[in-house]
Image (cartoon, helix red, strand yellow):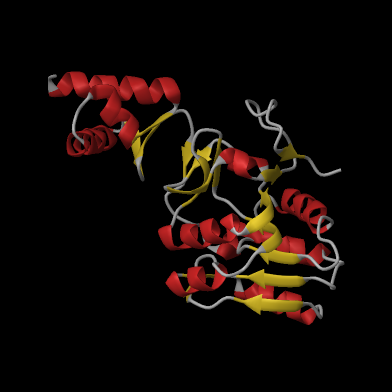
Amino acid sequence: MLAQERLSRIKERVEQQGSATLQELVDYLETSESTIRRDIRTLDLRGEIVKVHGGAVAVNNTSFKMRDDEISDRRIIHMEEKKLIAKYAAGLIKKDDFVYIDAGTTTEFIIDYIKETNAVYVTNAVNHACKLAHMGCEVYLVGGKLKSATEAIVGAETIEMLSVYNFTIGFWGVNGISKRTGFTTPERLEAGVKHTSFLNCKKRYIVADSSKFDSISPIKFADFNDATIITEKIVRGYEDCNNIVLPT
């Protein structure tokens, strides 16, 4: 197959589906992985598709966030929506729960509404831990590297510590939500922390305002149907999803 034909077929496939994985394109075109990687890179440089970790997404089908915004900026964006989501989420915590609260601005708002102090809390966010401690809660802050942009503790040490916990309920922030690509975040170390804590939790909740839907970041940490999503309104195209909850 000629190179131009491959490029055209890759672009067509990505645009039709909204996204495509590297392995999917390898199987579809019966071509080597290295060739497909090179073709994706070429199309990305042309601005015809967007290269992401493990594949590509269509230019016009979704928004794409390559990096985290500074937490000071994110705290003031969609604040009322985040508070509505956080208040509902806090009400789900029961006596004797073993709770994981992920780093993030929406998850931070949850702490403002927590009434259940007879639960044990674990977090990878320094500010979250301080707020919980000042409320008189029993709280554990995992160790590791401090990521300044999100104020999250990340890294191999963090993952090792989280791997021994079994949470009854947990809440995670997210940069992107998509039916096809799941829950995504820009940075590999933070994605690893999210993934490990997520796997070790019985009741999983993604807390995210509606702007996060149909947005994709480079690293997936969980599949779309593996958590309940708490958001302030239903986004078009997600009306039939049974894992979305609106605060009441």
The extreme left residue here reads 2
Q: Is residue 75 visible?
A: no
Location of residue 40 with respect to 167 vertically, above or below = above
What residue sits 65% from the left and 29% below the top?
Answer: 238
Position of residue 2 in the picture relative to residue 62 (left or right): left
Quadrant containing the N terminus is top left
Residue 242 image position (x, y, % from top left): 71, 32
Residue 10 image position (x, y, % from top left): 29, 25
Position of residue 101 in the picture relative to residue 138 (left or right): left
Position of residue 179 in the picture relative to residue 5 (left or right): right
What residue sits 26% from the left and 30% below the top?
Answer: 26
Location of residue 90 with respect to 65 vertically, above or below = below
Location of residue 228 with respect to 56 vertically, above or below = below
Residue 129: name its quadrant: bottom right
Residue 163 image position (x, y, % from top left): 54, 67
Q: Is residue 247 visible?
A: yes
Residue 8: name its quadrant: top left
| Residue situated in front as seen by the camera: 18 or 221 | 221
Position of residue 11 in the picture relative to residue 1 (left or right): right
Query: How many numbered circles does the render carry?
Result: 0
| Residue situated in front as seen by the camera: 73 or 244 | 244
What residue sits 39% from the left and 23% below the top?
Answer: 15
Residue 248 image position (x, y, % from top left): 87, 43
Location of residue 208 with respect to 71 vertically, above or below = above
Residue 173: name its quadrant: bottom right
What residue sits 73% from the left and 61% below the top?
Answer: 109
